[in-house]
Amino acid sequence: MTKKLADPADGNAPAARHVPMRDFSRSLPMSLLRAREAVMRQFRPSLREHGLTEQQWRILRALAAIEAVEVTELARTAFLLGPSLSRILRDLEARNLIERKTAKADQRRSMVSISKEGVKLMAAVAPTSEAIYAEITRRFGARKLVELQEMLGELEQSLAGRGSADETIAEG
Amino acid sequence: MTKKLADPADGNAPAARHVPMRDFSRSLPMSLLRAREAVMRQFRPSLREHGLTEQQWRILRALAAIEAVEVTELARTAFLLGPSLSRILRDLEARNLIERKTAKADQRRSMVSISKEGVKLMAAVAPTSEAIYAEITRRFGARKLVELQEMLGELEQSLAGRGSADETIAEG
DNA sequence: CGCATTCACTTAACATGTTAAGTATCGTTC
DNA sequence: GAACGATACTTAACATGTTAAGTGAATGCG
């Protein structure tokens, strides 16, 4: 069960570390990925029962808090790229969960809002969703949860405004 | 700039909170998603220069540490689902970055290993990758980074063995 | 006004995520 | 040893991630 790692001192060992690097399973990206997956695994079955994907749910939640938004701002809020959002909005509109109308002042902009049916669907999903979140909070610890989120925010901050180590394309 | 939230006491306000819920932008899944994106944004340009995606890089890294693995174990290590891995391995094999051979004992299993070219590519990417990781560590703080990863691990643990609040499908 | 540029999306194309179904092989049971 | 179920993938189908290109509408400028 315990994974046998190659011992560099063991000339007869089956393995060789071709390129020496950190154990990638303990890298920050992997830690974040696994943690997020562990969390989302809790929610997906409930969403699935209502025919919603994680992203669709994000969009509805973002819309539920306001009257109407432009697509671009919705993309920022729901943390989705334009093309993904474009497709998902098309589908949500076809299911009558959202509504769109082009802005009067600027014909390029389209204002998106949640529909009456969308609100009903949200109301149906929200209680379970909140309960699951509460259970996660209980299991992990409310205080630690706050602490974790603060650290995640700080991590974001410390990397903000840097496309990468190579590029120097700031977005301002 | 500051987003105007609807005031329920303001009957004439443009907005209404259709379904009362937590501010989803501060939810744990979103925090984890944004944090991971902030981190990966640092690495992608470098990987892209070498024609590698994040997932392909994960696979090569997993392979670099050992002699050969079965596809199923590789999926677990690289945290990829079987179908995704199947496709990516097909492409990596076409690019001669990995090699496959069916196991003698069990014809169903195929053993995957990194090729000589794959090792060369890794050697070319690794220094930059390590440098970026070091810079992230420097910016965020080495101690805090360890602390964060511990918390992420604990979060995983606290949710382990639970498909969801609905299902009770343990995997053991 | 005429026109190039920018802006707000949308489409397109390809890689991956995700679930379900298919295929070949292995183990086991009778 | 033939049939059955389990195992280790692979394929298929559809949704999303991601980058590039396309489209129509504003904006800036000579």
Image (tube, coloured by chain):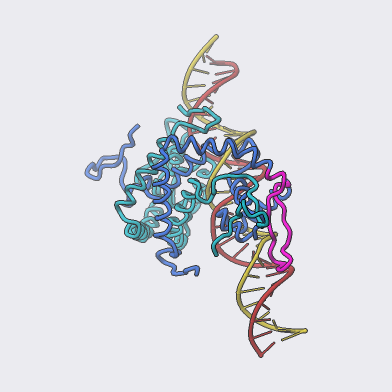
Chain colours: A cyan, B blue, C red, D yellow
**Position in image of residue B95 (x %, y %):** 72, 46
Q: Nearer the viewer, residue D5 or D29?
A: D5
**Position in image of residue B108 (x %, y %):** 70, 66
Q: Nearer the viewer, residue A146 or B97?
A: B97
Location of residue B122 by image quarter: top right
The region drawn magenta spans: B96-119
Residue at 47% over, 29% down: A171
Q: Nearer the viewer, residue A44 or A167?
A: A167
Total numbered circles: 0
Q: Nearer the viewer, residue B31 or B10?
A: B31
Judge whether residue B74 can be spotted in this image: yes
Location of residue C27 by image quarter: bottom right
Relative to C6, A112 lies left or right: left
Point out the image quarter for the N terminus of chain B. top left
Above or below residue B90? Residue A82 is above
Relative to A34, D5 lies left or right: right
- In the image, residue B100 lies in the stretch drawn in magenta: yes
Residue at 73% over, 59% down: B101
Residue at 39% over, 43% down: A152
Above or below residue B128? Residue A142 is below
Above or below residue A48? Residue B49 is above
**Position in image of residue A77 (x %, y %):** 42, 41
Relative to A51, A19 lies left or right: right
- In the image, residue B10 lies in the stretch drawn in magenta: no
Relative to B43, A74 lies left or right: left
Judge whether residue A96 can be spotted in this image: no
